[in-house]
Image (cartoon, helix red, strand yellow):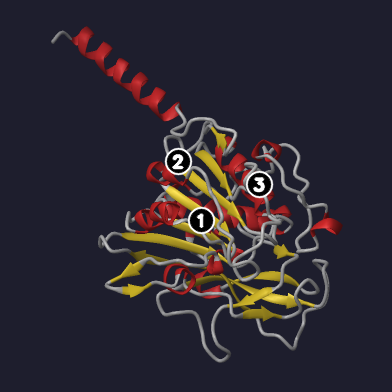
Amino acid sequence: MSCMRFVLLVLLTLDFQSLRAAEHPVPESPLWLTYPGGEGPGQGKHIVLIAADQEYRSEYALPMLASILAKHHGFHCTVLFSLNDNNEVDPTKKIRWEDKTVTHNIPGLEHLAKADLVVLFSRLISLPENQLEHIYKYLDSGKPIIGIRTANHGFLGFNYKKDGKKVDFGEDVLGGSFRNHHGRWQADSTRGLIVEKNKEHPVLRGVSDIWGLTDVYRTFKEGGSLPANCTPLVDGQPLKGRKPDDEVNSNLIALPVAWIKTWTGNAGKTARVFHTTMGSAEDYRNAGLRRLTVNAAYWCLEMEEKIDPRSKVDIVGQYQPLSSGFDYAKLKVVPRKPGFYK
């Protein structure tokens, strides 16, 4: 082969690879949102984000995170939602504790097969078995997981088994399930404190000034600690109020609100896991929490050498999430089509 032909072949191959990296792996649909990746280290990687809670406005938070990851970091992103019978994002839909006939619906879960990372923000949802199968397969894939806030009690009727034993998604996969509010629900806020002994961890690179309106979750018994296979990164100190400079609640110790671990499914493949129990849509107004989560995406994908403490985590466009809570009429929470959130 002549030198000229060889160079031409190399250039054509590079152009083809660039084209493939530029193509979003999921088709556009009125049932979900797609965000093609721009320039950045994440080019060619695909992140699927699942918004399916009823309290903390994940339907606002995850599209916002997807736009940051796509525009500033180059990742292709897809946001899936829990939809009602009218194909609307519907946080007002009941759970099976309230209505035993309820089944939730997340169209597009088959695209987990094309995901390099899943970000889950669900709460007590009950999915049909054919949709759960896509999640079970992902848990066996060895690909990483980020869980946000209520993801540690994200499912009802979750029947994944490992070695014949039923797996608790919160305890076993994420490293802890919601046990109680450590403080006053919707009265305290949380100051994030970097865990000193782990301050050099890549996920914490450039992270500072973490604060959020949500209260601290307790994920283990009093007197206990995170499981030994978890590495704590951020502790949450309850404050006596809903402002960043409110007084520390000295009656309540700081508890872990962000950590990392690994998970190994039935296929014997090990995945990286990051979990934060902060993360309401209002919490994510905080740049420190946004950077923590973006950094976690890089780490989960084994791209920690590309974590830049000065990278952009600015919100893309307008971000006006509704407040957390269940008083849907007062909060003006109504079912809306997925496109509303883009």
Real-space Cα distance between discs 2 and 1?
A: 15 Å
Q: Which residue is mark 1?
A: 296
- Expressed as whole percent of the image width and height from the top left, the position of residue 86 reads 65, 42
Q: Of the residues under marks 2 and 3, which one precedes in the sequence?
A: 2
Name the residue rendered at 61%, 53% in the picture.
291
Callout 1: SS:
helix
Q: Nearer the viewer, residue 88 or 249?
A: 88
Q: Residue type at mark 1?
A: Ala
Q: Is residue 84 left or right of residue 175?
A: right
* Quadrant housing residue 330: bottom right
For the C terminus, the quadrant is top right
Tell me the residue at 41%/52% (across/down): 130
Q: Residues within 10 Å of mark 2 (few under 14, many from 20)?
A: many
Q: Residue furthest left?
A: 1
Query: Does 324 appear above or below 307?
Result: below
Amino acid carrying mark 2 in the image = His
- SS at circle 3: loop
Instruction: Tell me the amino acid under the disc marked 3.
Output: Val
Mark linked to residue 89:
3
The quadrant of the rendering that contains the N terminus is: top left
Mark before the other along the chain sequence, 1 or 3: 3
**Relative to residue 63, is residue 255 depicted above or below?**
below
Q: Residue at x 59, y 60 (%)?
A: 102
Q: To which quarter of the image does residue 162 belong?
A: bottom left
| Label 3 crowd (10 A; few <14 / some 14-19 / many >=20) | many
From the image, state whether disc 1 or disc 3 is nearer to you. 3
- Residue at image mark 2: 46
The percent position of residue 185, horizontal first and vertical second, equals 75, 75
Whether residue 253 appears in this view of the structure is: yes
Of pointers 2 and 1, the one earlier in the residue sequence? 2
| Residue beneath the point at 48% across and 44% down | 47
